[in-house]
Image (tube, helix red, strand yellow):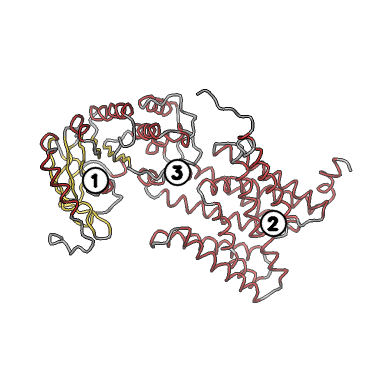
Amino acid sequence: MSALIEFEDLTLGYDRHPAVHHLTGAIARGSLTAVIGPNGAGKSTLLKGIVGAVRPIGGAIRLHGVEPKAIAHLPQVAEIDRRFPLSLYDFVAMGAWRRIGAFGGIGPAERARIGEALAAVGLEGFETRSIGTLSGGQMQRAMFARLVLQDAAVILLDEPFNAVDARTVADLLVLVHRWHGEGRTVVAVSHDMALVAEHFPETLLLAREPVAWGPTAEVVSDAHLARAQRMIEAFDTHAHVCARAS
Amino acid sequence: MTAYDLLIAPFADFEFMRRALVGSVALALAAAPIGVMLMLRRMSLTGDAMSHAILPGAAIGYLFAGLSLTAMTLGGLIAGVAVAVAAGAVARSSVLGEDASLAAFYLLSLALGVTIVSLRGSNVDLLHVLFGSVLALDDDALMLIAGISTATLIVFAIIARPLVLDSIDPGFLRAVGGRVGASVHLVFMGVVVLNLVGGFHALGTLMAVGLMMLPAAGARSWVDDPTATIAVAALIGVISSVVGLVVSYHLSLPAGPSIVLTAGVIWFVSLLFGRRGLVTTRLGRRHLEA
């Protein structure tokens, strides 16, 4: 399989402090990868780096045959203002932005797609509900419906299964597998080891520096996880300039 | 007193009343979408801040050309846009948020404006700038107000979708639309300034904000959809203009404040008795089964 997203000695960070430190490797086209690691390991930062929201402070990210705007990204904490009185239908419909833009109409074809997306996440009948009245799980389903509508070749999910019940997780996983089956590249951050082991063929274990990357069964081991935990606890506010920084 | 004497006669008998009506209705129509979007974007006080910010520009125009429509409009426009752009730039490039930088700029602007007005002229002139003169709108002022209202509604139709998306999920708009979010915010602020400048000839810089925010806040108590909110706000604005002018005529009250006070009364009644009002939602409404 060919590399779709390539990291070359990549360092991402904030205010010169690295959050992702010297990462080298590639995410293959059509792969289904989990990113795991302790809190503060740089998982979210890595996803933000891929879409260009955080610029590398060392090394590079290379995208092969896909532009950052064509990557769908579900952030962990979306800056969504749910007090804005918008219907679920209109909210989900914005997933079609790349096809309809700021002025394009929403025709019968697009309406059919929106209907399918809502059905895929089990939110039919909720179309006219204001987004402020949805529960946490329903809102996460709405976010997934919007992702479906984006029809992106690359989908990055940041802790998509947090704070949702088992049935919602199961429904959303069906979608993840459908995307994988359709040849899309999916990267998901998760803290649920059992879920990762069962559903994700590839895993990257990150603790600012990469600890292990490869088939999930080999990556998820007690030794690797313990090492990741030790590396995270060694944070230093008054760190010196990295000897490997060029 | 018949209904004709009460409602129609003031406008039928006096041209200045007809002009005032046309001017304030035009202002109310454009102010509705702006006020609603300011409110939904949690920028209700931004309109107020911007109305202070346009003062030095209008004052400089006044300093050089006296009470000239063109000079004061241009000056106000330049000052307002400058403050909006500067506040946005400072917010993006420093640790200050948009609220703090806007506060700093508009306070400076206000102090500068009052200083400039006091360099020449009397308190009467200052009162005109601050509170307008809706009963003295000439042809040029009416054309300006009507032109601004028309332009506002057209611009709004164009930026509606990105503006709503930028209000709800700016991160998503950045991801799919790139710089659209930042530019739509700037266009929106430009329209806000344009309407405040249009409003200050009729209502003054301070009262113009009242016709924006009070109908918007009142409409929110009736409906729960952005489009419907704008429609109801426009209706409240128009009613406030008519009733405000009639009240000011019969009771010899200043016209601009009468319009804003009427809008205030409608807002308060909506707050209590609107479909989603405080009293309505507490009286005899037993909960449903599902």
Q: Which residue is mark 1?
A: A43
Whether the residues at callouts 3 and 1 have beta carbons within 8 Å, the answer is no
In the shown orientation, is residue B248 left or right of residue A73? right
Q: Which residue is mark 3?
A: A81
Tell me how far mark 2 sits from mark 1, CA to CA. Answer: 56 Å
Residue type (three-letter) at the residue carrying disc 1: Lys
Asked whether the residues under marks 3 and 1 belong to the same chain, the reply is: yes
In the shown orientation, is residue B163 left or right of residue A193? right
Classed neighbour count for the residue bearing mark 3: other residues with Cα under 10 Å, few (<14), some (14–19), many (≥20): some
Give the quadrant of residue B36.
top right
Query: Which chain is mark 2 on?
Result: B
Viewer-nearest residue: A113 or B285: B285
Tell me how far mark 3 sits from mark 1, CA to CA. Answer: 24 Å
Residue A81 in picture, x, y percent from top left: 45, 43
In front: mark 2 or mark 1? 1
Residue A185 in picture, x, y percent from top left: 23, 35
Query: Which chain is mark 1 on?
Result: A
